[in-house]
Amino acid sequence: MKSLIDIRRDLHKIPEIGFQEYKTQQYVLAVLQELKTEFMHIKTWRTGIIVTIEGTAPLHKIGWRTDMDALEISEETALDYSSEHEGFMHACGHDFHMTIALGLVERFTTNQPIHTVIIYFQPAEEGPGGAEPMLTWVRANEPLLVPDYMFACHIAPEYPVGTVATRAGMLFANTSELFIDLKGRGGHAAFPHQTRDMTVAAASLIMQLQTIVSRAINPLEGSVVTIGKMTSGTVQNIIAENARLEGTIRTVTAESMMIIKDKIKALCTATEIAFDCELSIDFGSGYYQVFNDAICANALLEYAATRDELVSYNCPPAMTGEDFGYFLKEIPGAMFWAGANTAFGLHHSRISPDEKLLLSNIDFVEQFIRQFK
């Protein structure tokens, strides 16, 4: 097998979005074939891969999930191994995640574990969501590949390499996309009374949406409604016939998500009446919260605390979203933040995590799984 750094850089060059990870899948399969043993088995699902390494005396089936997809972001790192796919980038660390998983396969095929280890290379984490359909397919077609416990990590730019940060309970929030299309009547700016101005309607709706969290949600249950993009109009002297709002919803509880969606629908209906227009709402894809099993999360923290080279940190929850939550909804387990020590945050065009995190986390996860009771 190539060096970990070479593998990570190879993967970094070929970013692909959800369910289009064809080159990525072929690259990972080629590396896995080099590591093939009589106690290792490979299954594919769409652009994903499931690797099973039989245990010598399996008490448990331990699952490890890595995501495979990239983002529609133009890379600006100027690295000599930058993305070769214009407009796409591994800006969320999935190239690191896959390399860690391949490093684990190498370790467990070189020195067979006691537990059976099942490694999921999961597509489409960034969207439209690969975890839920992948697990549904496995349950229906390969039920023996459902782990007893499930673990994963995600790089954390703000933490130093060697940090293992997690918590029992909610680590990441419930999330939902939000798309609202407004249709009115356009016309010349000199005759506004003959139009139904969708720029004004959209602006009014944006301001009203900001009242939902402050007035409809318990202040002890953090929630976010953000409109990140507004599109309307064509030129400066034409009143817009159409407008489009794109945003995100994030909540601590599933109940809050339902309340917010109901309030958005009500405000959209009110906007239709007030501005004599038509609105359509699409909540797009949504992710279930990453809710860590207390025993599993504490086991990660306690084992990390025994390693002199690591920092074990019981961290606060974050309003980020991750479809690993669908695994944890059905299988006890936990996710942790892996320190990446980089100045730029997740989804930034110049993020460049410290490659030292590869060996640090492979060592940690391998030994954690071997000693897991």
Image (tube, helix red, strand yellow):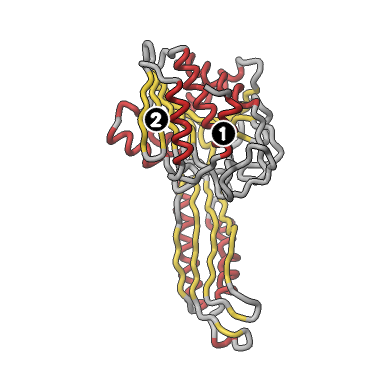
Under circle 2, the secondary element is strand
Identified by mark 1, the residue type is Asp
Identify the residue at horizontal 37%, vertical 11% (top origin). 57
Residue of label 2 = 50
| Left or right placement of residue 127 versus residue 346 in this view | left
**Residue nearest the observer in this picture, 336 or 33:** 33
Residue 158 image offset from top left, x and y in percent: 68, 36
Crowding around mark 2 (Cα neighbors within 10 Å: few <14, some 14 to 19, many 20+) is some
Q: Earlier in the sequence, mark 1 or mark 2?
A: 1
Residue 31 image offset from top left, x and y in percent: 47, 26
Residue 73 image offset from top left, x and y in percent: 59, 49
Identify the residue at horizontal 48%, vertical 61% (top origin). 263
Identify the residue at horizontal 52%, vertical 44% (top origin). 252
Tell me: residue 181, above or below residue 66: below
Tell us which disc is closer to us: 1 or 2: 1
Residue of label 1 = 10
Query: Furthest residue to the left?
Result: 141
Under circle 1, the secondary element is helix
Q: CA distance from mark 1 to mark 2?
A: 21 Å
Answer with the quarter of the image where residue 12 lies: top right
